[in-house]
Image: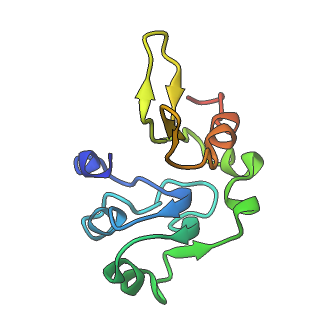
Amino acid sequence: MLPFLNDRKDLAVHSELVSDGVIPLIESGVITGARKNFKPRKIILGFALGSKNLFDFVDNNPIFEFHPTAYTNDPALIARNDKMVAINSALQIDLTGQVCSDSVGTHFYSGIAARSTSCAALPLEGW
């Protein structure tokens, strides 16, 4: 998903997890957090998962602000950002629109993480 955001500007991140994909978007000015009204110019995250390059980039970088998952996934905090859009992964989508994000058939792939939280936090005003 992240490579398809190169034509955007002033995007922000409030996430349980960030990975290597944020680096080029930060370096090119796509992710700035300039328009956030909650924690502007900060990437709010619970943890980083990726390469040594990611960890070197995050280390002592003031744009990154780490918090416990209870904070990053708090619907009341997430909803403080106007026009917030949640982007989550999907492994399968059936013909009725039901989304599966944690397993393929009977094989577990990942946890549900903050999916329900981010849906609950979507602000309705000003959208």
Q: Is residue 87 above or below residue 11?
A: above
* Quadrant position of the C terminus in the picture: top right
Q: Name the foreground residue: 124 vs 17.
A: 17
Q: Name the foreground residue: 68 vs 49.
A: 49
Q: How is the image coloured?
A: rainbow
Q: Name the foreground residue: 1 vs 98.
A: 98
Tell me, yes or no, if residue 85 can be seen here.
no
The x and y percentages for residue 43 are: 52, 66
Residue at figure coordinates x 25%, y 51% from the top left: 3
The x and y percentages for residue 66 are: 61, 74
The x and y percentages for residue 7 are: 22, 47
Residue at figure coordinates x 56%, y 70% from the top left: 47
Residue at figure coordinates x 34%, y 77% from the top left: 51
Count of residue discs: 0
The x and y percentages for residue 30 are: 31, 57
Q: Is residue 81 above or below residue 20?
A: above
Residue at figure coordinates x 63%, y 42% from the top left: 118
* Quadrant position of the N terminus in the picture: top left
Q: Is residue 55 above or below residue 78?
A: below
Tell me, yes or no, if residue 5 can be seen here.
yes
Residue reaching furthest front?
Answer: 106
In the rendered structure, the answer to whether residue 46 lies left or right of residue 49 reads right
